Image (cartoon, grey):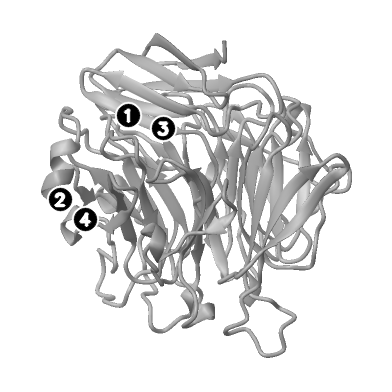
Amino acid sequence: MIRALILMVWAAPAAAQVSFTDVSDRLGDHVYDGGWEHFVGGGVAVMDCDGDARPDIFAAGGSNPAALWRNTGDMQFAPMPLPTLTGVTGAYPLDIDADGHMDLYVMRVGPDVALRGGPDCTFTDATDLWGLPQTDQWTTAFTAWWEDDNRPVMAVGHYVDRADPDGPFEACDTNTILRPTPKGYRADTLDPGFCALSMLAATDARGRMALRISNDRHYYVRTGYEQMWDIADRRFLGQADGWEDVSLWGMGIASADLTGDGRDEVMLTSMGDQLMQLAQPDGTYTRAPFGLGTYAQRPFIGDDGRPSTGWHAEFGDVNNDARPDLFIAKGNVDQMPTNAMADPNNMLIQKPDGSFTETAEAAGVADTARARGAALADFDGDGLLDLVVVNRRANILLFQNTTQQAGHWIGLSLSQPGGNRNAIGARVSVTTDQGTQIRELRVGGGHAGGQALPLHVGLGHAKQADVTITWTDGTTSRATYAAGRIHSIQRP
């Protein structure tokens, strides 16, 4: 299996030694805290909320208020006012009303909140304005997609039913699909629910849009598994569809096409093994071989041999060598004795043969706080992906990517008319003499947070790239773009 993967990976130059510098003082103090209802969550949302092409940061606080920082340039950040929000587990940025300002769907223990973005990183509560039905459920997962040229369909994942007197074990709550109506939104129940901690709407290995749900076995115990829901057919896939029942302590989802074949591989974080699923030509998935280097099942530093606990996972090319790398945020749930306490984050760098090697300690990001949400984003505009990490009961961390001799890169910012302004669902092929990389624009995945930013694609030694975009209406556009800058591309 790994030989087949190796043969499909494009050739590229040797990777630069990845390095990061801790600049957490630029954000100051912010802690994700709280009781058992905040053992999970702790997400971070990254978006440009003032139109200056610099990524800004929203972070969940749990029992503490959520926080917002405006990026003022040169890796400096200014705290910004927000409506006072506590009980926040995370948030996802998306332009719900297509007005050109990024909005936030804020997940909470209790009724969720939709924040409408305005000029200069101002946000106002638009939950009632947009007719979003809310409940007292415990929200821990979110994703969105567009089925027409109107408003987004949003999937909301709920964890344990706090009102169940027989809980919390085997008391997983149902999930919700929010569908736009002429007067707002309608809430449709998605059942069964197995304690969702991450959701991602994306094209699956079959080439169809599907809603993947990662669930926490800790509370469903014996009866649940990972789920895949066909968006067009509105049904869960089963063994007759080639969908394997996989049960794990699911925390987060990340996906990326690692082989250039147009099918995304999928990383599922968990307590213990981090499971990579390799997409197959027949539309199914197989488990990655151990030699791929992605299982990251125990701490790689220190003497704690107990299993790791993985949370947010994210692919991103941190050295711009044209091969996606993988960051995994790690940390004990709280004081769980079966799992490692000093549990360093992983920075897995993809090698030319398609396998991954651990570099977090050498790179300077092997922090051992109880990490939860995270994001890779170019905060200082130098073409290198930086890193922000939210921790439970410890301060938020910010790392500046200081990698020397990295490859070239290109940024692609897509827009189109209509309700799906940011072209969520569009597929982008970036081709150089090193091969083709295929990306899809989506909202969701990770753990309790995501980003709405231009696509960042490493190019290795290439100084330009041929870009083909398949837009959401099925039309395509092709052009050649120079490396080293972000290109704004509108649908013709």
The secondary structure type at the circle numbered 3 is strand
Binning the other alpha carbons within 10 Å of mark 4 as few (below 14), some (14 to 19) or many (20 upward) gives: some
Q: Is residue 313 visible?
A: no
Tell me which label, 1 or 4, sits earlier in the chain.
Answer: 4
Place of residue 348 in the rendered image (x, y in percent of width and height, measured from the top left): 28, 49
Mark 3 vs 2: CB contact within 8 A = no
Q: CA distance from mark 2 to mark 1?
A: 19 Å
Q: CA distance from mark 3 to mark 2?
A: 22 Å
Q: Quadrant of the C terminus?
A: top right
Please tell me which residue lies in front, 272 or 14: 272
Q: Residue furthest bottom?
A: 166
Q: Is residue 474 visible?
A: yes
Please tell me which residue lies in front, 58 or 189: 189
Q: Residue at x 26, y 76 (%)?
A: 305
Q: Which residue is mark 4?
A: 293
Q: CA distance from mark 4 to mark 2?
A: 11 Å
- Give the number of the mark in front: 4 or 2: 2
Binning the other alpha carbons within 10 Å of mark 2 as few (below 14), some (14 to 19) or many (20 upward) gives: some
Q: Which residue is mark 3?
A: 439
Mark 3 vs 1: CB contact within 8 A = yes
Q: Amino acid at mark 4?
A: Gly
Q: Residue at x 15, y 32 (%)?
A: 14
The secondary structure type at the circle numbered 4 is loop
